[in-house]
Image (tube, rainbow, N blue to C red):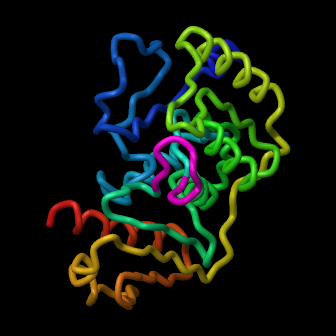
């Protein structure tokens, strides 16, 4: 693993897909600390988990692997967290997907997102969002609907090489900071879901559009997840 080869003695891993079942546990190196699935980027384990992760581990940088483009951006399987639930998600009026919403959470704790691995459109999204970020593309959606994917061995070699280069010099990459007060808004695919949180404090509902206003991005993001979880269990 590139992080280990560069001398980093502790790596935290938070799987954000499929409730952690994508991780091959037997293949993990001994200096990798496995966090509960989804805990670093969602409130499924409670927002207090963010303080435990981000404040107690002296994290100097973050890398995202296997990220998708935001909804409406094109590319391979574009969505903003959940294509069945959200048409779009915006931070202060600007559309964002998983990359932007998580990068902003990292920014609340002064942690820069230094590298993103995904398809070509996700890579472009990351580059537009964070100056200097290392964006690695391992697949590309073709005009005819097919997806051009690098063979696993070639993708692994590319990721290792590019992450190694990134770890040599990432001090110029700054944490993503959101202007506050912040408005985190999202548009629902199903209007009836809005009734689940229409009376929640700080949440404003107008038709299919939901707005969360806060003096803290982390608080707004936590409220967003409260809304999302209510939909998932409804």
Place of residue 215 in the rendered image (x, y in percent of width and height, measured from the top left): 56, 81
What is the x, y in percent for residue 167? 75, 27
What secondary structure do most residues of the magenta stretch adopt? loop
What is the residue that sits farthest to the left in this orientation? 234
Q: Residue at x 36, y 39 (%)?
A: 17
Of 112 and 155, which appears nearest the observer? 155
Compare residues 215 and 21 and report the one nearer the observer: 21
Residue lying at the far front in this picture: please name it.
Answer: 144
Of residues 113 and 83, the one drawn nearer to the viewer in this rendering: 83
Q: Quadrant of the C terminus?
A: bottom left
User: In the rendered image, which quarter is residue 141 located in?
Assistant: top right
Q: Is residue 116 left or right of residue 133?
A: left
Point out residue 193 in the picture as x, y percentages from the top left corner: 24, 76
Q: Residue at x 28, y 80 (%)?
A: 191
Q: Nearer the viewer, residue 17 or 59?
A: 17
- Look at the picture and state if 227 lies above or below 123: below
Residue depicted at x 79% and y 23%: 165
The image shows residue 17, relative to residue 224, as above or below, that is: above
Which corner quadrant holds the N terminus? top right
> Which residue: 49% across, 50% down?
78
Q: Is residue 132 magenta?
A: no
Residue 114 vs residue 214: left or right? right
In the rendering, at what x and y percent does residue 31 appear?
50, 18
User: The magenta stretch spans which residues?
Assistant: 70-79
Q: Is residue 127 above or below residue 32?
A: below
Instruction: Answer left or right for 22 relative to 121.
Output: left
């Amino acid at each position: 693993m590139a992080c280990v080869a560069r001398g980093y003695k502790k790596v935290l891993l938070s799987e954000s897909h499929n409730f952690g079942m994508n991780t091959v546990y037997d293949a993990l190196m001994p200096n990798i600390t496995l966090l509960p699935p989804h805990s670093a980027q969602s409130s499924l384990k409670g927002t207090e988990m963010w303080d435990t992760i981000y404040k107690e581990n002296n994290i100097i940088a973050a890398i995202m692997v296997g990220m998708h483009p935001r909804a409406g951006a094109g590319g391979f399987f574009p969505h903003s967290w959940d294509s069945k639930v959200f048409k779009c998600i915006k931070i202060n009026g600007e559309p964002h997907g998983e990359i932007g919403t998580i990068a902003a959470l990292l920014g609340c704790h002064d942690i820069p997102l230094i590298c993103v691995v995904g398809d070509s459109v996700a890579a472009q999204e990351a580059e537009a969002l964070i100056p200097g970020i290392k964006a690695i593309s391992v697949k590309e959606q073709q005009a005819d609907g097919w997806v051009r994917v690098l063979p696993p061995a070639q993708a692994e070699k590319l990721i290792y090489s590019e992450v190694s280069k990134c770890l040599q010099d990432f001090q110029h990459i700054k944490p993503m900071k959101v202007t506050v007060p912040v408005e985190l808004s999202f548009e629902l695919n199903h209007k009836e879901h809005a009734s689940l949180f229409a009376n929640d404090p700080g949440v404003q509902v107008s038709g299919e559009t939901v707005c969360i206003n806060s003096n803290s991005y982390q608080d707004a993001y936590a409220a967003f997840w409260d809304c999302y979880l209510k939909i998932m269990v409804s």
